[in-house]
């Protein structure tokens, strides 16, 4: 039996809030959903908020003098207030809605590469350096590769240690006065590693570089406070946060967002438009071209209310309890190796592993036949697989609705996989 | 369990692959990658006029992609190029048929065991990986001859 | 009494499909929703599709070997098939999902301005010309202004005639061998004008320029077939098409989309990623970075099914009947002037007007007090207001659920406005 | 009808605006635009040391924005700059109070008629347009004096 840490959540009650968890799969299998790092499931209050919005308040925002328009606008802007409070943003206007975390990250890379910024701090040029890490999601690699190609800036990166941590030995050389921006993941979506943001921020401050944090995996799983973290920008995504698809968030310090030139043009991002030139609205609207994801913002607001109701500290503690149990049980399975930190220090509820001699596709497929949903592949973080010399991993990821019994089902499933391909 | 996907024939080819290991001489090779899962395969072909003299491969991948390459080797080595193209077309048709296409054993041999894979969209690419690489390699070999 | 054209729709039955139409406003007023050009209301099958997706099939797409992942992927890709069929696209891979029409338009402007395209046909450079029109939505003006600023290309535009039409007298000079792209609106969101796309396409073909059509207002209201139209690219948005917010579409000819460089980087748009460089997936995935608007695509698919069920020809004929009735009744109101085509020739179901001596804000406010929801302002098309020397207009816009009785309520409301400010 | 928004006082100021029409001499002017609706206003101020000697304005806009400019003219002309700033602060507070702020008639005079506007977010900008322009103009006038 594995050692048990107590979870502060009443998981059985939490599970009742998520209709999909009652779903029976083909062959009447129960669903064991261990793929929350890919996308989370949605609780009833989020679904209700969406339906209520479309059935009673649907209208376009920021444009209408009619009652529905005012209701929709106040619901949309109210969601902005909720998000701002959730991440400790000093000002609501620093919260921008995007379509997902990828767009948020691209927004920063793209505007810095556009050449339109007046202030050189926000304009990439030849000789400038961009620093990322080898454990980034593709969405925080490719935008910077494109930005470097367009501007002649140089892309550099932190490597990884054998045990799945950021190798910060070269910190002072890597982040240097030529560095314009450091963009790194808060919690790795493949390794589960939680990165030492404070170190990076401290060094970035010394050299005057911006810090963009990819919080796609951290904001849903732990209390995140942008003021405490001291970063300049934070990106995250709604669908991993109990919210709808089609919405993400970029938070940025007002000064930084003011300094970045516009990204997409049109709709409500303008102050005045003439055929021969336009001026732009203040933030946040400057970065919200066109009709925003209105219902999705409302849904994300409901998600944040739901999580706040449970308490993000409780969510994190539940994550830790489940992860400790999972690591412990996986250690007991012959042939299973964890890729990433193998202890509970600075790690989240995502566990990647390999099974000796069996390809992750086959592991995942046979698990699926038992109702256990995991993700297999390189998890949009191929350089991590290359770094550890593996083609892919199997990844089990947990959230507030995950139970110890589901971990047991995973372990039983792996034993079955081994029998099948043995 | 897994019957429809993991047919005995597939598991046999996976556990005892035919044609595995890159061989010389060869006229052309092609390297293909499955972006979803990172699987990779290199396929080499040696042509002798209209004849497929040898097919060899190497790479890393799941049981489906490895078994499929083994079946490919078995079916196409020693046959004509035009026959190989027919078999390849039939295999692609089967894989893209969403489980609705009836496979012809005369054409596909052990390949019919993959009929069940067509019902798993995420795995169709695995089954096709070596076939796409083979097609490329043959095209290159023929282009070089000209 | 106004002359009556017959509507082919059973509007009473249609209205039952839209739950919001039963909404009572403050003071128990009935809702008279005449703001569909801003955003349309959503029928029950769209709301059901969203709920069913989140409650039963929610998972990330294109990544998972598990059952929910396969269901979500086939629902998402199935929506792409439906959209392709709806607009007569020759190939499903030519349909890209974006967050709204504005992003679709920006995608084209942005990639052409990025300098990354290999083929000069898709790369804007100094000396190149971009042609738009004076009746574009801001979302089809600002992206081109930014693109021109970044590349040194020149932005030119068609003017408007007194009666609200495109002034195509200068067509042959305006579209000339220096023109790389012509981007124009199919149906104006402020004037209602339907533009002579065939003329523009013919001339663009002669000089080898691309044609991008902004179909935000046309695709929801008439049968649109990209093959018949002969354009290269078409942008539209889900929320005006009975679909959810948070989703738009860019269709493009395969050759053109292949030629454009990537837009946003990350997630599933790659073929392979290494730290020192990446290659990109074929269309459509090349342009779909990050987790797409999955549920929203499913909802848009349901919207398109719903409209196809009624028949887009019937939707257009209903629009025409309502618009003819509205124009006729508005002609009868002293002091009301229609801005835009005042006849039924080449015009859609959007009617902008002014009321002598009364500001549109005041018109809209007093109409709202009677439950009549219209839009007031420059409708994100400020150059049109400047062109006609007015600060703003009041705009009533109709859709498949609009009734003659609602037009009567509008006219009664305007009379009330006049009494109030008289 | 419309009672809470369109108070009699507002309609009076709208129909008979005070201070309308740009006048000379002036020390600074500011032009503000409401991006949502395209309303525009130009406000001119003439200062005489600490005194607001004149406020004049012109522009196009709805009843709320026109009436608000008229009230502004009436309240601030002839007073001190510091008094003007207090009144402006109170008016802004009222407008942004979502209908929860109790207006002080001693400070705001006819401005209290705008209390209802605060419940209509889309119209708050209309009411504030001239006040924001006034603030800018005063700042400019004082900056030039330095
Ligand atoms: C003609 C036209 N183009 C583009 C848009 C932009 O659409 P969206 O706001 O969904 O991006 C609109 C609607 O606002 C429109 O009417
Ligand atoms: C660490 C990390 N960053 C970025 C992303 C991108 O998020 P999205 O796909 O919602 O854009 C993800 C998730 O896929 C992620 O895990």
Image (cartoon, coloured by chain):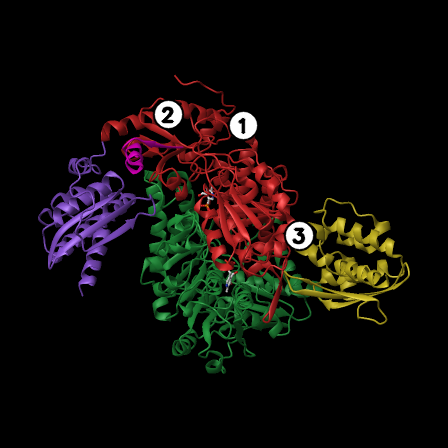
Chain colours: A green, B yellow, C red, D purple
Element type at marker 2? Answer: helix
Disc 1 is attached to a residue of which chain?
Answer: C
Residue displayed at 12% across by 47% down: D75
Judged from this view, the residue extending furthest toward the top is C1
Residue A306 visible in the snapshot: no
Q: Mark 3 points at which residue?
A: B121
What quarter of the picture does the C terminus of chain C occupy?
top left
Element type at marker 3? Answer: helix
What label sits on residue C330 in the rendered view?
A: 2
- State which tag comes first along the sequence, 1 or 2: 1
* Closer-to-camera residue (A165/A289): A289
Element type at marker 1? Answer: helix
Disc 3 is attached to a residue of which chain?
Answer: B
Label 1 in the same subunit as label 3: no
Which residues fall within the magenta stretch?
Answer: C352-368
What label sits on residue C212 in the rendered view?
A: none
Instruction: Count the labels in the image.
Output: 3
User: How far apart are labels 3 and 2 at the CA level?
Assistant: 56 Å
User: How far apart are labels 1 and 3 at the CA level?
Assistant: 37 Å
Residue C362 colored in magenta in the image: yes
Contact, mark 1 vs mark 3 (Cβ under 8 Å) = no
Circle 3 residues within 10 Å: few <14, some 14–19, many ≥20: many
Which dot, 3 or 2, sits closer to the camera? 2
* Closer-to-camera residue (A422/A242): A242
Q: Position of residue C113 (x, y in %)?
A: 53, 57
Residue C29 visible in the snapshot: yes
Q: Name the residue under label 1.
A: C314
Note whether C7 is above or below A373 in the view shown.
Answer: above
Note whether B57 is above or below C164 in the view shown.
Answer: below
* Closer-to-camera residue (C65/D115): D115
Residue D133 as seen in the image, left or right of residue B144: left
Residue A281 colored in magenta in the image: no
């Amino acid at each position: 039996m594995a050692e048990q840490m107590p979870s502060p959540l009443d998981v059985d009650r939490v599970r009742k809030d998520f209709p999909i968890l009652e779903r029976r799969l083909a062959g009447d299998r129960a669903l064991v959903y261990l793929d929350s790092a890919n996308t989370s499931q949605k609780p009833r209050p989020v679904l209700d908020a969406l339906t209520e919005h479309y059935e009673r308040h649907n209208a376009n925002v920021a444009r209408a003098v009619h009652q529905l328009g005012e209701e929709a606008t106040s619901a949309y802007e109210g969601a902005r207030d909720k998000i701002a409070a959730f991440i400790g943003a000093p000002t609501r206007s620093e919260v921008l809605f995007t379509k997902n975390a990828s767009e948020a990250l691209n927004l920063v890379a793209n505007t810095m590469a556009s050449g339109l910024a007046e202030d050189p701090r926000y304009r990439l040029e030849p000789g400038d350096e961009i620093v990322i890490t080898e454990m980034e999601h593709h969405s925080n690699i490719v935008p910077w590769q494109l930005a470097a190609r367009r501007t002649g800036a140089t892309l550099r990166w932190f490597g990884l240690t054998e045990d799945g941590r950021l190798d910060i030995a070269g910190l002072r050389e890597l982040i240097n006065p030529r560095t314009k921006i450091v963009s790194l993941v808060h919690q790795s979506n493949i390794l589960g590693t939680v990165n030492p943001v404070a170190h990076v921020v401290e060094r970035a401050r010394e050299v005057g570089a911006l810090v963009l944090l990819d919080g796609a995996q951290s904001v849903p799983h732990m209390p995140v406070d942008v003021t405490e973290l001291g970063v300049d920008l934070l990106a995250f995504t709604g669908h991993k946060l109990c919210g709808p698809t089609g919405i993400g968030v970029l938070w940025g310090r007002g000064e930084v967002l003011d300094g970045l030139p516009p990204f997409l043009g049109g709709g409500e991002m303008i102050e005045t438009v003439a055929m021969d030139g336009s001026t732009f609205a203040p933030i946040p609207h400057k970065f919200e071209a066109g009709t925003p994801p209105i219902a999705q913002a409302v849904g994300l607001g409901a998600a944040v209310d739901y999580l706040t109701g449970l308490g993000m500290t409780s969510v994190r503690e539940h994550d830790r309890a489940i992860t400790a149990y999972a690591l412990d049980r996986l250690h007991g399975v012959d042939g299973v190796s964890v890729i990433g930190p193998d202890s509970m220090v600075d790690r989240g509820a995502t566990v990647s592993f390999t099974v000796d001699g069996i390809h992750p596709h086959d592991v995942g497929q046979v698990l699926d036949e038992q109702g256990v949903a995991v993700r297999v592949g390189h998890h949009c973080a191929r350089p991590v697989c290359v770094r550890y010399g593996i083609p892919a991993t199997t990844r089990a990821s947990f959230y507030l609705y995950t139970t110890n019994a589901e971990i047991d089902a995973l372990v039983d499933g792996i034993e079955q996989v081994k029998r099948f391909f043995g | 369990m897994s019957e429809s996907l993991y047919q005995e024939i597939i598991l046999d080819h996976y556990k005892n692959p035919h044609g595995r290991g890159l061989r010389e001489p060869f006229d052309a090779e092609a390297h293909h990658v499955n972006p979803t899962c990172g699987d990779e395969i290199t396929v080499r072909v040696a042509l002798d006029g209209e004849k497929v003299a040898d097919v060899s491969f190497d790479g890393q991948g799941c049981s489906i992609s490895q078994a499929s390459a083994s079946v490919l080797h078995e079916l196409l080595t020693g046959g004509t190029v035009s026959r190989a193209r027919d078999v390849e077309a039939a295999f692609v048709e089967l894989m893209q048929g969403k489980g609705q296409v009836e496979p012809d054993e005369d054409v596909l041999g052990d390949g019919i065991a993959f009929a069940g894979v067509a019902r798993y969209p995420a795995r169709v690419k695995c089954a096709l990986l070596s076939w796409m690489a083979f097609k490329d390699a043959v095209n290159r070999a023929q282009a070089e001859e000209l």
